[in-house]
Image (cartoon, rainbow, N blue to C red):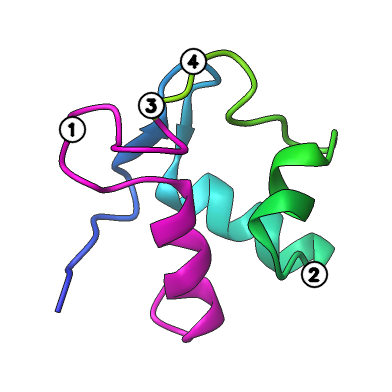
């Protein structure tokens, strides 16, 4: 099981932590990655590909992981 530090920066280009992204997901009711990436309330994943793909540190910790953890109530 992945233990994700809520303060871990996920979208480095937009300076967003896992907690920031989770809050945006919860407040706006996003359920899909497409919805999350297309929204304008808290832009993310719009400058580079790493936070959507392999993660900034190439470790798989990315926006889709945060969305999954929020959906499962783990974040």
Estimate how packed mark 2 is, as few (under 14), some (14 to 19) or many (20 or more) residues with alpha carbons within 10 Å.
few
Image-quadrant location for residue 45: top right
Q: Position of residue 12 (x, y in %)?
A: 41, 21
Please name whichever residue, 29 or 54, is drawn nearer the observer in this view of the structure.
Answer: 54
Q: Earlier in the sequence, mark 4 or mark 1?
A: 4
Q: Earlier in the sequence, mark 2 or mark 1?
A: 2
Q: Is residue 5 above or below residue 43?
A: below
Q: Earlier in the sequence, mark 2 or mark 3?
A: 2
The residue labelled by disc 1 is: 58
Q: Earlier in the sequence, mark 3 or mark 4?
A: 4
Q: Is residue 40 left or right of residue 72?
A: right
Segment colored magenta: 51-75
Image-quadrant location for residue 29: bottom right
Q: Position of residue 11 (x, y in %)?
A: 46, 30
The residue labelled by disc 2 is: 29
- SS class of the residue under badge 4? loop
Measured Cα–Cα span from mark 2 to mark 1: 28 Å
12 inside magenta stretch: no
Q: Which mark is residue 36?
A: none
Measured Cα–Cα span from mark 3 to mark 4: 10 Å
- SS class of the residue under badge 3? loop
């Amino acid at each position: 099981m992945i233990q994700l530090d809520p303060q871990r920066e996920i979208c480095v280009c937009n300076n967003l932590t896992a907690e920031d992204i989770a809050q945006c997901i919860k407040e706006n009711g996003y359920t899909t990655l497409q919805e999350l990436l297309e929204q304008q309330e808290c832009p993310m994943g719009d400058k580079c590909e790493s936070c959507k793909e392999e993660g900034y540190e190439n470790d798989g910790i990315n926006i889709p992981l945060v969305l999954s953890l929020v959906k499962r109530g783990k974040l």
